[in-house]
Image (tube, rainbow, N blue to C red):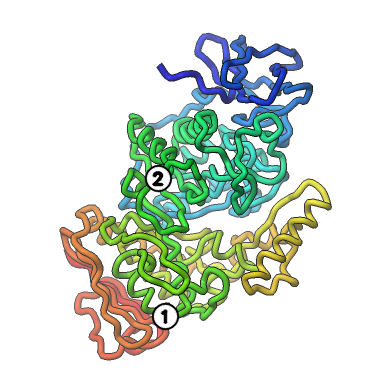
Amino acid sequence: MTAPSPWGARPLGDGSWRFSIWAPAARYVALLLEGRELAMEPGRAGDWSCRIPARPGMAYLFRIDGRDLPDPASRAQIGGVEGPSLTVDPEAFDWARTWSGRSLEEAVFFELHVGTFTREGTFAAAARRLPDLAALGVTAIQLMPVAQFMGRRGWGYDGVLIRAPHPAYGTPDELRAFVAEAQGHGMMVLLDLVMNHFGPFGNFLPDYAPDFFTDQPTPWGDGIAFHRPEVQAFFRDAALGWLCEYRLDGFRLDAVHEIRDGQDQRFLRALSDEIRTLDLGRPVHLICEDERNLTHLREAGFDAEWNDDWHNVLHVALTGETQGYYSRYARDPFADLARALERGQADEGQPHPEGPRGTEAAHLSWTAFVNANQTHDQIGNRAHGERFISLIGEEAARVTHAVLLCMPFLPLLFMGEEEGSEAPFLFFCDPPDEAMRRAVRDGRRAELGRIGYDAEHMPDPTGLEAFEASRPYPARDPARAESWRALTRDLLDLRARRIVPLLKSGKSGIGDVTRHGPRAFAVRWPFEAGEIRMLMSLGTPATGAASLPACAFRLGDPTHDAFGMEVEITA
């Protein structure tokens, strides 16, 4: 029998609740429930617990050596991250209808930041926009992190209460209603889950559980002791709670290279195995971000990985920017692009002046790669938050948009991209005082300056203006936006009708790439049931190439235009 988890408040089904916390450095721990102080019993491994009558909607805190603190596994807060926490019955929501999910091959991801997606910045307002996305052909919403952080605005990667939806976005049931609305329109919902660090403001765990952390820092703060079973239980409970209590269709796990357990990421592999044993009546899709370009997680149960190689080589090839991490692709970006078209990744462990990176990935299915022309990362980690279209121009952006949606890899669009938005997406946050705001500004300026950006004149990341400027809707030019939306709709209709069946039939070999001039390619991707052929010009015409005879979609003329593409699909 599995031992009770040392984290959180959970109903036991008989009117009683179990409250637990791991506080190995504490001498005394009590539960404050609606103002009553109830001593908790210590366990043998630094855990404390009690079982008492309770009901949903009760305010509680943990009194730890005289200090009143929120539950780090809180499902909801009354106000800010300082507390109090709120008891929540995760089984009370009426889902009204069943949901059997969708296959991974059908996925067209749409990355969405709740706070800037609508003027209201709430789950309820975002839910009202979902029918429009479904009508375009979007099949999977990928929510940027919604776990509670300090302040009202932020990207979400500085969460400190990993299981509590951020109250500025809405209540837990309003998030469930968002998920139900999406699934009612045939769209999956995946959550970007951050398990590699906590935000710098409002994280109280180090005070009473210093063993939760290690002396090996991450780029964002203290490293996490994933080798400890109590720490594994904390994150396991969080992941399974989000998945089961909110009927999610999966996760995008942030920067898994920083989830270090000293055992070749056994924690992540065990989590994947446990999720695969659940009988949820729907497929669950696990996607990771791993800057190392390794394949071991995809070979051990994860479905796909964010493929930064595609974005990076395309960005260098079309913008000429080579600062920071783009420098790796500066030598011959179009050769790297050809390799990414052929095999999925550009870096597969081959010799490189900066050192080898990655392992061979051509044996993986095409759906093991999530490709994007832009994401929150790539736009927001610029001094002025420029989108790809602002750097390469309208014609090139439309062609690369079509290429992305017609390749066999899983496509991801960042909100606004479906209608050609040129609105920036800036980094923004809401520190609690001026000293911390100054530290964020100085740190951001130094970080971006080191990689070659003009950060001296960047918008203030702690100001309301950066947040407001990052809203992509409504479009400034409605007619232009509708032209883009028509393009997206046509492409996604083609993908659903002609490309998805090929993906489901299975890959039968790597891509075959022929170069036609310095910036043009002919590509053939084979499947058990047919093939996709694409001809594209990305800066120079495809010299000597013949147009595809049974073209299913064409944008421009790649044999004569600097930017153009056409695709042929046979089955």
Write down the residue under mark 2: 286
Q: Position of residue 324 (x, y in %)?
A: 57, 70
Q: Give the residue at x 59% y 44%.
A: 223
Write down the residue under mark 1: 332
In this view, the residue in front, 535 or 271, is: 271
Q: Give the residue at x 33% y 29%.
A: 279
Mark 2 or mark 1, which is nearer the start of the sequence? 2
Instruction: Point out which mark residue 70 bears.
Output: none
Placement of 48 over or under 570, stated as above or below = above
Label 1 to label 2: alpha-carbon separation:
33 Å
Image quadrant in which the C terminus is located: bottom left
| Circle count | 2
**What amino acid is found at the position of numbered circle 2 in the picture?**
Leu
Do the residues bearing badges 1 and 2 touch, measured as CB atoms within 8 Å?
no
Query: The residue tagged with tag 2: helix, strand or loop?
Result: strand
Query: The residue tagged with tag 1: helix, strand or loop?
Result: loop
Q: Position of residue 386 (x, y in %)?
A: 60, 70
Q: Position of residue 322 (x, y in %)?
A: 53, 76
Q: Give the residue at x 76% y 16%.
A: 35
- From this viewpoint, is residue 440 visible? yes
- From this viewpoint, is residue 478 visible? no
Q: Give the residue at x 68% y 35%.
A: 206
**What amino acid is found at the position of numbered circle 1 in the picture?**
Asp
**Residue farthest right in this picture:** 434
Corner quadrant of residue 224: top right
Placement of 543 over or under 512, stated as above or below = below
In this view, the residue in front, 129 or 61, is: 61
